Amino acid sequence: MSYVTTKCQVQRLQLCRETGTQDAVLAYAKTTEALDTAHLSGPEQQHYKTFGHDRRRQSFLWGRYAAKVAVQALLPEQRFPQIDIQSGVFGQPILNVAQPLG
């Protein structure tokens, strides 16, 4: 099942393994529309302020927005500012939410 939010395309997936299945979501945005920082958590806003170029700032905002749309599709009770996504040592996303997953 897929659907489009006002700013993102969302695709629900099911990952199948020998040990069972797991729900997953893919969300992405392809736009040149500017986005504000209202959906960022406090630490994400601090990280956002370190970017020197507008293109990088918008890329960061849209990436975080799409990731949060995906998380919210699986955890609808979570609000965007409660979903905190930080970067790990190798740049990988580290997800922090207000309650434990599953």
Image (cartoon, rainbow, N blue to C red):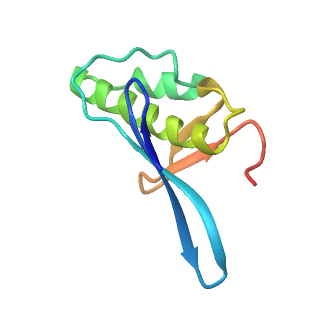
Residue beneath the point at 51% across and 28% down: 44
In the rendered image of this protein, does residue 8 appear above or below residue 74?
above
Who's the residue at 73% across and 51% down the image? 101
Image quadrant containing the C terminus: bottom right
The residue positioned 51% from the left and 35% from the top of the image is 69
Please report the residue visible at 59 percent of the width from the left and 27 percent of the height from the top: 80
What x and y, as percent, mark residue 61? Answer: 39, 27
Relative side of 20 to 98, left or right: left
Left or right: where 48 falls relative to 71 = left
Query: 1 and 21: which one is in front?
Result: 1
- In this rendering, the answer to whether 12 lies above or below 4 is below
| Front position in the image: 26 or 40 | 26
Residue 83: quadrant of the picture: top right
69 above or below 49?
A: below
Expressed as whole percent of the image width and height from the top left, the position of residue 84 reads 60, 35
**Is 31 left, or right, of 10 in this rendering?**
left
- Residue 7 found in image quarter: top left
- The number of numbered badges drawn on the structure is 0
Farthest-out residue, front: 1
Quadrant of residue 29 within the rendered picture: top left
Provide residue 78's location: percent of width, then percent of height.
68, 32
Q: Position of residue 38 (x, y in %)?
A: 51, 15
Where 61 sits versus 13, above or below? Answer: above
